[in-house]
Image (cartoon, helix red, strand yellow):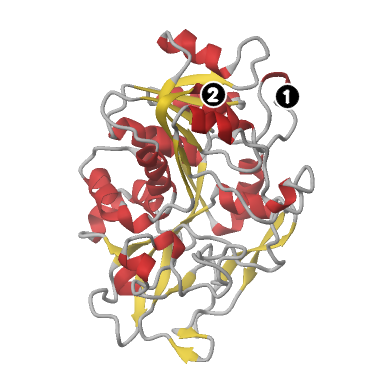
Amino acid sequence: MADNRGVAYIRPGVVEVQSIDFPKLALGKRKCNHGVILKVVSTNICGSDQHMVRGRTTAPEGLVLGHEITGEVIEAGRDVEFIKVGDLVSVPFNIACGRCRNCKERNTGVCLTVNPARPGAAYGYVDMGGWIGGQAEYVMVPYADFNLLKFPDKDQAMAKIKDLTCLSDILPTGFHGAVTAGVGPGSIVYVAGGGPVGLACAASAQLLGAACVIVGDLIPERLRQARKFGCETVDVSNKNATVAEQIEQIIGIPEVDSAVDCVGFEARGHGAGAGVEAPATVLNSLMEITRAGGGIGIPGLYVTGDPGGIDDDAKIGKLGIRIGLGWAKSHHFMTGQCPVLKYHRQLMQAILYGKINIAKAVNVQVISMDNAPKGYKDFDKGAAKKFVIDPHHAIAA
């Protein structure tokens, strides 16, 4: 039996690389004939992982992290027909059966069968079905024929692996945020949050033809990264100008066509309140700066259980949102996990044909698995980087 290692959550602020069981084609005591085992080529640290590592969820100690996975198939169950040993594949972070009503409607973020507690599942994530995470050397993926996206040429894919590794989550999630906010040719777009998902959303808005993309954040390094690929920026910690006033300085009016929340439930206040957590701030500000009839996409994570919430309401995901303002302006909203399969192949093609350079936009930095704990610490400090773990030293410098 081969060895395996994974990145495990130990306690708030601490992750460790540990020896873990080598994956089996099994679901409990039942054989998983529709699954495959992957040798992980790349697996990314996500802001959603960071929520758990900060102790802001009910994640159990010992949870093996990681839901952004790209790998090579080394074993396939007997019922797998279209995915073969040796294929290099991208794994959607949503685990989906392909058989339930929601999966058949391509709403794979809320599959009805893969999590006994609630709709929707993901690898290595709290309350998402108990599936073992992919920040490991090897991982098991169920329902392989339905879930996996095979890259057409392995050598071509490895040459672009720093881009293609983003297909498992942040690129489709950012793209989903832009699409659900109504972004199209000529749109003026505001993206709240300059982390990897926010930058992926900004790059996606450009891919969709937006005329102007504005990224808001309070970390100067992230704002500089956004400007590197043509975005305008807003410093939400500015005490002398509101977000709307800064937008007006850029485009001449204080409102945009579409806005996307890429921050989520750990949002901080704006202006003088930027040092204090205020979880409803982003959503309320987006309603203020989005024009009447505009759209708001919300791929930023909001949870139903937050032990570190600022008050009893926040601890159960209850926020002081001005829904009346959104109603009065006829905004449309879209929340929830991105259904990766809806965009997976199209975004792969956009990468392979050079229509988007997502690795450059999100500033991919490849690290070894042993350096994963340091990657988590640097990311938590606001580094404008997307940390990609290379478990087998397979990615060229």
Q: Amino acid at mark 2?
A: Glu
User: Residue at horizontal 49%, vertical 51%?
Assistant: 336
Q: Which residue is mark 2?
A: 288
User: Residue at horizontal 35%, vertical 40%?
Assistant: 179
Q: Nearer the viewer, residue 391 or 248?
A: 248
Residue 221 appears anywhere in the view = yes
Q: Amino acid at mark 1?
A: Gly
User: Residue at horizontal 36%, vertical 76%?
Assistant: 74
Query: Residue 310 occupies which quadrant of the picture?
Result: top right
Indicate the position of residue 21 as horizontal and vertical percent values. Answer: 57, 79
Q: Which residue is mark 1?
A: 273
Q: Nearer the viewer, mark 1 or mark 2?
A: 2
Indicate the position of residue 215 as horizontal and vertical percent values. Answer: 48, 26
Q: Earlier in the sequence, mark 1 or mark 2?
A: 1
Q: Is residue 337 above or below residue 237?
A: below
Residue 286 appears anywhere in the view = no
Res 173 label: none
Mark 1–mark 2 CB contact (< 8 Å): no
Q: Nearer the viewer, residue 73 or 334?
A: 334
As helix, strand or loop, the secondary structure at mark 2 comes to helix
Indicate the position of residue 101 as horizontal and vertical percent values. Answer: 36, 69
Please indicate whether residue 125 sits to the left or right of residue 388 in the image: right
- Density class for disc 2 (Cα within 10 Å; few <14, some 14-19, many ≥20) is some
Q: Nearer the viewer, residue 275 or 8?
A: 275
C-alpha distance separating marks 1 and 2: 17 Å
- Density class for disc 1 (Cα within 10 Å; few <14, some 14-19, many ≥20) is some
